[in-house]
């Protein structure tokens, strides 16, 4: 089954579920993070952010933007995981004669190239939905959700306006995904090196626990590396006429790297750990070994 159309289909399904469900589940945290990034006065802290949104919009207001989140990150997950497995196979075959012939460094190079390639295409699928999500979450009164937000954004800037943030999105997501996959693969090996016995000594549930732990550790690194671009994406999609240079001048370099970072670390660490856990659980459910 491995590397067959069925294999890639299962990996794509795992990606859809792992990214779509987890990003939707952390919508309240993402909502607060985005608002902290674009308005530090009104949302000076995590607790204050939750309090202000709940007071103004009620508890249900904390779920604002969940529909474009679910759709966008499901599309992204399909491309991220499905294409990663495809490119990993192709690159190692062409460059090194197969994964089994690779040294650890060659594996890192192949995994990095495969994950970067996969994320490039995954972000094209994600970008329009991310643009609507951020505008709905950060611009008061703009729209209630996807059904009225998407038509308004199309009327403002056309399809091109939905892709205004594609370059910063690549800047955020490609480094994030490279670390997410390369660090995960390395950390899995490291964890099994610390644990007694061999990997085969552990049952599938225990192996999935290792997948979650490795994913969480990798997610912390992902959050730090991708955070400046995440700030840019939020600010660009909040305002129709914003530019990268103007945003950097307004925020300053320190704020660009640090504003909203603790919440992003908590969110991305948990999210990445859950993504790897769900992705590998889907593979196990179809009779395949964990990553």
Image: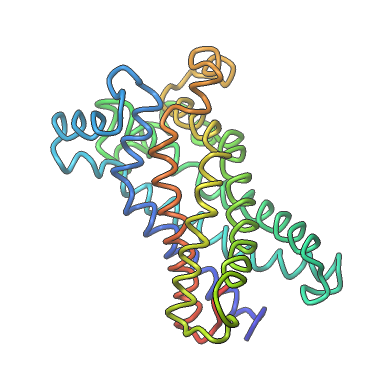
Label total for image = 0
User: In the rendered image of this protein, does residue 289 appear above or below residue 235?
Assistant: below
**In the visual, does 171 lie left or right of 40?**
right
Coordinates of residue 219 in the picture (x, y in percent): 51, 51
Coordinates of residue 57 in the picture (x, y in percent): 16, 33
User: In the rendered image of this protein, does residue 22 appear above or below residue 290?
Assistant: above
Coordinates of residue 275 in the picture (x, y in percent): 45, 61
Considering depth in this image, is 33 or 129 the residue closer to the camera? 33
Coordinates of residue 236 in the picture (x, y in percent): 48, 26
Q: Residue at x 42, y 61 (%)?
A: 274
Considering depth in this image, is 161 or 101 the residue closer to the camera? 101
Q: Quadrant of residue 155?
A: top left
**In the visual, does 152 lie left or right of 215?**
left
Q: Quadrant of residue 39?
A: top left
Q: Residue at x 24, y 37 (%)?
A: 144
Image quarter of the C terminus: bottom right
Q: Quadrant of residue 85?
A: bottom right
**In the visual, does 28 lie left or right of 96?**
left
Q: Residue at x 69, y 53 (%)?
A: 117
């Amino acid at each position: 089954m491995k590397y067959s159309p069925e294999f890639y289909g299962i990996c794509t399904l795992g990606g859809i579920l792992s990214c779509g469900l987890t990003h939707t589940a952390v919508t309240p945290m993402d909502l607060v993070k985005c608002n902290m990034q674009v308005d530090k006065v009104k949302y000076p802290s995590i607790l204050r952010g939750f309090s202000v949104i709940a007071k103004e919009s009620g508890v249900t207001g904390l779920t604002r933007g969940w529909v474009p989140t679910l759709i966008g990150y499901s599309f992204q997950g399909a491309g991220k995981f499905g294409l990663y497995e495809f490119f990993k196979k192709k690159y190692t075959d062409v460059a090194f004669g197969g994964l089994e012939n690779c040294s650890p460094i060659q594996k890192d190079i192949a995994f990095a190239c495969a994950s970067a390639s996969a994320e490039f295409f995954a972000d094209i699928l994600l970008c329009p939905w991310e643009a609507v999500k951020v505008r709905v979450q950060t611009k008061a009164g703009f729209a209630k959700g996807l059904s009225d937000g998407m038509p308004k954004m199309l009327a403002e800037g056309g399809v091109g306006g939905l892709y205004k943030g594609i370059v910063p999105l690549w800047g955020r997501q490609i480094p994030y995904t490279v670390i997410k996959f390369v660090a995960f693969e390395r950390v899995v090996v490291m964890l099994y090196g610390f644990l007694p016995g061999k990997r085969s000594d552990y049952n599938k549930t225990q192996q999935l626990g290792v997948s979650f732990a490795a994913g969480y550790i990798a997610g912390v690194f992902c959050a730090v590396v991708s955070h400046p671009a995440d700030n840019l994406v939020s600010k660009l999609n909040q305002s129709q006429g914003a530019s990268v240079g103007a945003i950097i001048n307004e925020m300053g370099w320190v704020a660009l790297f640090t504003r909203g970072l603790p919440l992003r670390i908590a969110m991305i660490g948990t999210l990445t750990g859950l993504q790897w856990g769900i992705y590998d659980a889907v593979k196990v459910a179809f009779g395949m070994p964990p990553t």
